[in-house]
Image (tube, helix red, strand yellow):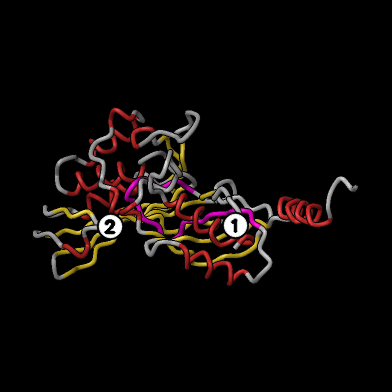
Amino acid sequence: MPIWSSSSWSRKIRLFSRLVMTTRYRATVAYDGTAYQGFQRQAGATPTVQLALEDAIAATTTQRVTVIPAGRTDSGVHATGQVIAFDVTWQHEDEALLRAINARLPEDIALQDIAQQPGFHPRYDALSRVYIYRVIQAARPQPLLRRQTWRVHQPLDMVLMQQAAGLLIGEHDFATFGQPPQGNNTVRTVMQSLWQRDAAAYGAKLTYTIEANAFLYRMVRRVVGMLVDVGRGLLSSAEFEAAFRKAELSQAGTIAPPQGLTLAAVRYPQQDV
């Protein structure tokens, strides 16, 4: 009698093929982070964006995967340009995989594109990340905007805020604004740091854009909080600069709430686009 029956042997061949013939997929993800405890998977059934993605991919492909992100957003933070990678065996078109995964995701998470890219790593291959923070200057609450903005009722001095924001451009020690996810290197390079103001019926919409090669934990929210304090006269420009140059977390001030923050884009070398 043979050691393996033909059916048993076929099953093992299929299993082996699945293990060795996976393909790396790269995808862009958008999500409303309101209902999630951040991106990173946590213990048990804690709702996170990573868990929802991995469950949807498993339901689509019958394969458990680990989703690798370009960055780990905090609880309540949103994304329009989060980039992920995962490895699966899939014998159909890429677009069919995207549609199938989206059909199994909750309505507040969706893949925007997908492509095969062997060897791609969302975090290590990234050149920079772009975050956008939205503030509304409004005397009264704006219910339809409460999940994507921080409402500030005081007048804000945009000139002072932009002057302070410009100090961040270049390579600096940003220890005042956060801690590294690992190690102790708090030096980062900021390529873009600017405010834009648009008039609105309720007052004004202020958008802050910051781009850097990498970010510290809660760095953007601390930067925004202190810049807004400059704008409303609670912190002078000189005090902001002194706290920044001291490069100590103890110098941090106001932390802006998470709902105003969105990971807008992750940039990669041109050949990877």
Residue 142: x and y in percent read: 15, 62
Q: Is residue 255 above or below residue 154?
A: above
* Quadrant in which the C terminus is drawn: bottom right
Q: Is residue 98 above or below residue 224?
A: below
Q: Which residue is painted at 9% across and 60% down in the image? A: 140
Disc 2 element? strand
Q: Circle 2 sits on which residue?
A: 134
Local crowd size for mark 2, using a 10 Å CA cut-off: few (<14), some (14–19), many (≥20):
many
Q: Which residue is painted at 46% across and 52% down in the image? A: 129
Disc 1 marks which amino acid? Thr
Q: Circle 1 sits on which residue?
A: 62
Residue 148: x and y in percent read: 27, 58
Disc 2 marks which amino acid? Arg
Residue 44: x and y in percent read: 42, 40
Please tell me whether residue 85 belongs to the stretch shown in magenta. Answer: yes
Mark 1 vs mark 2: give the one in front. 1
Q: Which residue is painted at 45% across and 54% down in the image? A: 52
Place residue 32 in its image quadrant.
bottom left
Please tell me whether residue 211 belongs to the stretch shown in magenta. Answer: no
The answer to which of marks 1 and 2 sits earlier in the sequence is: 1
Q: Main secondary structure of the magenta part?
A: strand
Residue 202: x and y in percent read: 13, 66
Answer left or right for 160 relative to 99.
left
Q: Which residues are magenta?
A: 71-88
Whether tag 1 and tag 2 are in contact, CB under 8 A, the answer is no
How far separated are the C-alphas under marks 1 and 2?
39 Å
Disc 1 element? loop
| Residue nearer the viewer, 41 or 44 | 44
